[in-house]
Each structure stands twice: as structure tokens, then as C-alpha cells.
Image (spheres, rainbow, N blue to C red):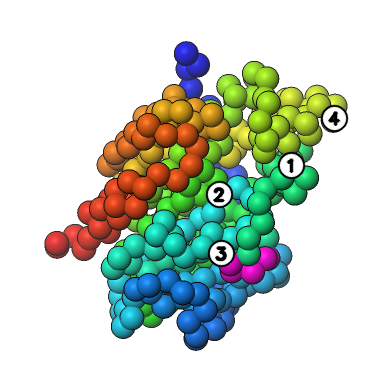
Amino acid sequence: MIEYAPYEPEDFDEFWRETAAEATAVPLSFRRSLSNDFDCPGFKVETFEFLATGGKTLNGWLAYPDGARRLPAFVWLPPYGLESRLPDAYGTREGFVSLSFNFFGNGAFHQEKYVAGNGYFAEGAGSPYTWVFRRMFQDALIATKVLQAQIEVDEDRIGSMGMSQGGGMSIWLGAWSPIVKAVCADMPFLSGMNKTLQGKVYRYPLKELTDFAENVPVGDAIVQNTVSYFDTINHATRCGKPTQVSLGLSDPAVRPDAARAVFQALPGTKIQRTYDWGHDWFPDMIDNNRIWLIENLRYKSE
């Protein structure tokens, strides 16, 4: 059995405080469609665009029940790939407002299946400052501010949620965003990467990263340094928000022991869900995640 444990670099906190400060400095600017743009029973779904890092504009959607005012809410972060998550049963919850967006400027409902040629795992991997996930996380921080600014949302009851890439990044938000008050992280990715990369990697998209390492001088050392700043086990040590973590017993992408290590590293209120499943959506996530957010986004007097 592989022993997974936190392994933060010495300047881990400094790096992420700087990363978050850059995102906070981006002016809050967004525009909603003010129309129902997707058929999702029980919800109105508006598209929106917002100002992200580097002066670019990103697209997303906002789902809310009719007449919503000051409801609890969550940002719904997509898994790996260029496509957008849709406002389906996993991206919405009864009694909640939810927001999701496309990390790459594609449309709010853009669908594009992953193939090795359109991946981004190796983009900027030569340094933690240039790796694509730093920019993506900053845009997630900005999107969370956009969600907080909506009239339908209770600004003090906001959570983060996602699967795989979205699950890992939800924990990152729990660690570094004061807006996020509770987290649901299903099969969180980038967990225990120092151990995973020491073995032979056969599966894409992670193999994009090892392909990169094989083609640059001292590539293995460079990649190990970069991922140490992003590993979800390391972020979990800083995530004191109530957090639910799930694992799949047959998951080949996020190994069960790696997901357990994320859970163990969390310092606050937490629960672990175990599914006899692979690396994919599981129907019980719908109710389990809703219950967790309801319980942990209550007013203190409730």
C-alpha cells in the first residue's frame, strides 16, 4: 500500500496568498442574460459572462428557483476537459442557487469530449507560477465572488462542489477563499501526486504531464516541484471548512488511499463517503451533497 501524506513546499502559504491576492485585485464585472437559456425543471437558468484574469472574459450559467432571494448557493466546478458542465441534477440542488463556468472561454453549455490532443495538463508545467491550474484557480476565486454578488444568493452561505478536477479545486477554494463556508469534494484529483508520479503512468490525461517531463531536462524534478504546490492533500491541511470527501473503491484515476489521505489531512469538521464505483458520477452524490451543504450552510442560530 502506498503511504500518502502532505508534503508542502516551504513557501506554500506565501505562494497561495499571492495567488489569491492577484485574483482579488481583478475588478468585479459581470453581465447576465436575464433570460431562461436552458431547460432545467424547477430552475431558471441564465447565462452570464464575467471578467477573469488577464483581462479575458469567461462564460457560465446561473441556476436558481423561481422567486429566489438570499438562498444558500454553491459554485459548481467542472472536471478535467474543455467542456462545460450542464445544469443537471448534479449541478443544481433543490433550494439552492448554483453557478458554473467554462475555464477556457467556451460557451456556458459547450460540449467537447476529452481526447489526448486537446488536454492542458502540461501547459506551463515548468513552474508553479505558470502552470495552467494556477490561472484556473484564480478564475474560480473570481467566479465565487460573482456568485456572492447575485441578489438570489445569501452572501454568507456559499459552498464549493465538484467532481475530480472540480472536487480537488473545491478543497482549494475551501482553503483560500473566505467566501466558501462548506465543501463537497467528490473523488478529488491531484491527490498524492508525488507518489503517483514516481510510478509508471499509463492513463491520460495525467500522462500528458509525464510526457512533458520526458521531453525537458530534469523534467521529473521540475514536475514534482510544480505539483507540490497544487496537490490536494497539501491544500486539505489548510481547509478548515466543513468538508465532505468521496472516494470510489474502483477508481483508477483518484486511488482510494489518496482520497482517504485528503480526508485525513482536513483539520475541521468532515465526513467521508465511500462508493463502490469507478471514477464517475454516482447517483447518491445528489442527495448526500445536498444534505451536507444544508447542514453546514445554516445560520449559526439555526
Q: What residue did someone put label 4 on?
A: 215
- Residue kind at label 1, given as amino acid type: Ala
Q: What residue did someone put label 1 on?
A: 116
Q: Quick one: label 4, few (<14), some, or many (20+) residues within 10 Å? A: few
* Residue in the foreground of this view, choosing between 281 and 212: 281
| Cα distance between the residues tagged 4 and 1 | 17 Å
| Cα distance between the residues tagged 1 and 3 | 22 Å
Residue 199, compared with residue 34, is above or below; it is: above
- Residue kind at label 3, given as amino acid type: Phe
Instruction: Determine the image quadrant of residue 299.
Output: bottom left
From the image, give the main secondary structure of the stretch colored magenta. Answer: loop
Q: Along the horizontal axis of the image, is 250 left or right of 112?
A: left
Q: Mark yes or no: residue 53 visible.
A: no
- Residue kind at label 4, given as amino acid type: Asn
The disc placed on residue 79 is: 2
* Furthest-bottom residue in this view: 34
Give the residue drawn at x 64%, y 18%: 199
Q: Mark yes or no: residue 271 visible.
A: yes
Residue 52, compared with residue 214, is above or below; it is: below
Which circle, 1 or 3, is nearer the viewer?
1
Q: What residue did someone put label 3 on?
A: 101
Query: Residue 157's spot in the image, x, y percent?
Result: 32, 64
Query: Residue 187's spot in the image, x, y percent?
Result: 46, 39
- Magenta residues, start to end: 105-109
